[in-house]
Image (spheres, rainbow, N blue to C red):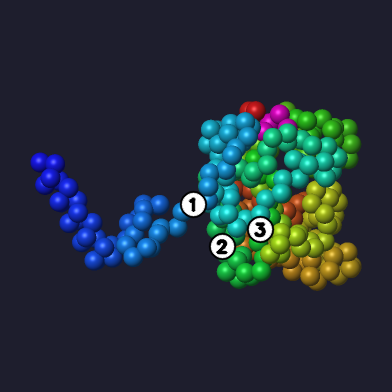
Amino acid sequence: MTRHFLWAMAILFFVSCVGRQEVGEVGIMLCDSDFVTLPPERPQYTVTEQKLLDFGLVDVQVLDPSICVHLVYATADNFLGQVLYADLRRALLLPAMAEKVAAAQQALRSERPDLTLLILDAARPLSVQQKMFHQVAGTPKNIYVANPRHGPGMHNYGAAVDVTLADSLGRPLPMGSQFDHFGAESHIDCEEHLLASGKITQEEYDNRRLLRRVMCEQGLLTLRSEWWHFNLMPTRRARQLLRPIGL
């Protein structure tokens, strides 16, 4: 029985090589030294990142490693001037959101192979949201930061991404304002006026339009006051359907 089994396996292997039958499983060697492309090595996730993965989020760069990620709240280079993400470095999102971002990246690179998406913020635990709002409470900036007492923001569901365009080296393109600039220069509903008045250049205007087009063509939604922000769905619907990240 064992001998017959081994002969059968040998014949099957020979037939598959002659016929050049490709195998759909990742990591299976094909004939004539062909290989199915292997995925990137599994990243080493931190405790917080693993909790977010267990929550049901996915790593955007696993879907598309060409997307650049630099989470600004993992550094002190943000509007609060302090590190808010102690051990969060990766862009984690709901699967549907991550797939749309990956599709936007492919659309962008098909049109502009010299450019890439650069993610600046993705999923944000509620505990961090509370810290952020506490810092701006009682200041004019509080209108730009969701108050958790009124309901979670879209980042708190993993259903929003802050993103910009970058060159092939990951350097951000000029967009007319800095990320997290709280002012009219960040608004998307007065860009023609900003251009006409010289507050943003034609290049910055065009960069914003390109970013918005590749993101919105995937069904993502904009936020009037932030050129960098895109949502998976309206906030009201998210609060009905999704669970906030209670970390």
Which residue was labeled with disc 3?
117
Across and down, in percent, residue 183 comes to 86, 51
Identity of the residue drawn at 60% across and 58% down: 66
Q: Mark 2 vs mark 3: which is more N-terminal?
A: 2
| Structural crowding at the residue carrying mark 1, measured as other residues with C-alpha within 10 Å and reported as few (<14), some (14–19) or many (≥20) | few
In which quadrant of the rendered image does the C terminus lie? Answer: top right
In this view, the residue in front, 172 or 161, is: 172
Specify start and end residues of the magenta stretch as a single range.
Answer: 125-129
Which residue was labeled with disc 1?
39
Vertical side of 91 occupied by 244: above or below = above
User: Could you give the CA–CA distance between mark 2 and mark 3, rounded to whole angstroms?
Assistant: 10 Å
Per the rendering, the mark at residue 212 is none
Left or right of 129, for residue 79: right
Left or right of 101, for residue 141: right
As helix, strand or loop, the secondary structure at mark 3 comes to strand
Across and down, in percent, residue 62 comes to 54, 49
Residue flagged by tag 3: what amino acid is it? Leu
Q: Mark 1 vs mark 3: which is more N-terminal?
A: 1
Which residue was labeled with disc 2?
106
In which quadrant of the rendered image does the N terminus lie? Answer: top left
**Quarter location, residue 154:** top right
Residue flagged by tag 1: what amino acid is it? Pro
User: Could you give the CA–CA distance between mark 1 and mark 3, rounded to whole angstroms?
Assistant: 20 Å
Is the Cβ of the residue at disc 2 closer than 8 Å to that at disc 3? no
Q: Mark 2 vs mark 1: which is more N-terminal?
A: 1
